Every structure is written in structure tokens, then in C-alpha cells.
Image (cartoon, grey):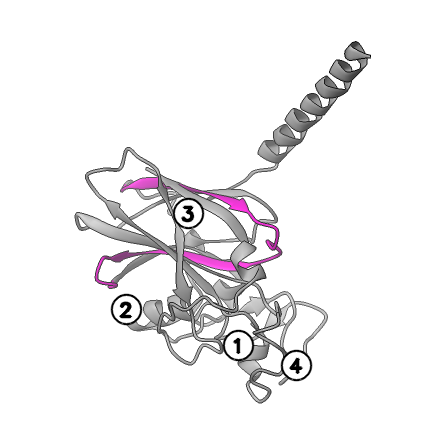
Amino acid sequence: MKIFRLLILLAIVLQACSNNKVKVNNLVELSTNVEAKETPFSINVVAGKSFHHPTFSFWVEDVKGNYIETVFVTQYLATGVYGHGSLGENKWDNKPGPANRPATLPFWLHKRAKAENLPLMPDATHPVPDGITGATPQSDFLLHSKIINELPDQFKILMEINIPWDYNEHWTNEKYPDDFNYKTSAQPALVYAVTINKNELEKPYFLNPIGHSHYSGEDGHLYTNLNGFSTALKIIESAKITF
């Protein structure tokens, strides 16, 4: 009986190791700013239970909140062409096409537009440069990038992430019934951040949630109250930055 139990335990351990190995092998690697030579770093994101085709961006600021540069944004938002194009208010195509969705990542959109003197929404005329964009990964991913601009002694790396139509008991379909942009988002985009010391790049840093964006993208403010959020907080499990 003892031998039988040991064999069962060994089978369970081997299965767990096998599962972990599969997950590692499925890790998606993304690269941006490939030709640059300045400040290389990587962000290892572990997907959470709610990770399902999210839109997200990573960018750099100084500690006062002044935008420095974007290092990654997913292609749908970067080009303004989504998996389901817009056919008018509350109408969606069954194939990719252009759409205007300011509630997708409002905090980043407003920061970038103001700093770079650009229209708020990227589109075919004003897309985000290809060198800092990529397809949305379907699971855990590792982003390799480089910060091109000169950095102060302390700076921040931020992430904004959102999944459309993720309603819950607080962010309901009827919360803002006349706001079309809200309905494309439901739970607003979440913002993560970490402050990094330029003289301590040998240690890892972890992004943590600091607030959310405007529910329909009307402004670029950060709202720090996270009450009422549920599945949105489970889009990612962790995000570790190493230099």
C-alpha cells in the first residue's frame, strides 16, 4: 500500500513539473526598440485568470509624472484597427476594421498626445511607430525593450491595461446608459507603476496597481479608488522588470 501511495505521489509531482514546463515553453517573447543601444530591460508578465485579449501599453515617466517615452503598445490601439470594426454606435462588424475607442487606455493616450503634440487616438494617418508595437500575446509574455531617452536618477515605468466589455456588479451595462464609450470598456483601464532608481538597476522591480483611468476616456486623470473592481484586477498576476 505504501509503495502504491508513493507511486501516486510521484505521478502527481511529475505531472506538475510537466505542466510547469509547458507553461515556460509557451512564454511569448516580444521585442521593441530593437535598433537602440540605450538602457535595455525586460518585463516578465504572468497572465492572470482574466487575461483574455487585453489591450495594454508600457511607458516611462519621471517621478513628477512627466511623460518620457512609450516602449510598447498593442497593435489594435496603435493602428486604430480593431478585431471588430465599428459600424456606428452600438454596432460592430464581424471582421477587423477602424474604430474610435478612447476608453481603451485613456491615461496613456492623454499623456502621449499632450507630450508629443499628437491627436488623442492613433489611426491610419497617425499610427504609433511599428518599432514599439506588437500583437497581443495570448498568455504569459516577456517584453524586451530599451529606453532611448536620457533618464533622471529616479524614474517610473507604467503599464495600463484593459479588457473590453468586462462588466460586473459595480460597473454594469446600465451604469452610464447614454455613454457609448463607457460601454466599449465596462471596468475602466487599470494603471500599474513602479519607481526605479537608476543607481540600483541590478535588482528586480515589480509593477503594482495605482489606480484607474476615466471610464469613458474623457480625461487623462488617474483615479486611485479601486473599489468595485473585480476581474480587471486579475488580468495579470505579476509583472517583473529587470535591467
Q: Looking at the rendered structure, which numbered label has been put on residue 100?
A: 1
Residue 150 visible? The answer is: no
The stretch drawn in magenta includes residue 55: yes
Cα distance in 3D space between marks 2 and 1: 21 Å
Q: Looking at the rendered structure, which numbered label has been put on residue 32?
A: 3
The stretch drawn in magenta includes residue 128: no
Q: Which is more N-terminal, label 3 or label 2?
A: 3
Q: Which residue is mark 4?
A: 87
Q: Which is more N-terminal, label 4 or label 3?
A: 3
Cα distance in 3D space between marks 2 and 3: 20 Å
In the figure, 80 relative to 57: above or below? below
Q: Which is more N-terminal, label 4 or label 1?
A: 4
Cα distance in 3D space between marks 3 and 4: 33 Å
Q: Which residue is mark 2?
A: 115
- Is 76 in front, or is 141? 141
Residue 122 screen position, x and y as percent: 45, 70
Residue range corresponding to the magenta coloring: 38-66
Tags 3 and 4 in contact by the CB under 8 Å rule? no
**Amino acid found under the numbered disc labelled 2:** Ala
Query: Quick one: SS at disc 4?
Result: loop
Cα distance in 3D space between marks 4 and 2: 31 Å
Residue 8 visible? The answer is: yes
Can you name the residue that lies furthest to the front here?
A: 1
Tags 1 and 3 in contact by the CB under 8 Å rule? no
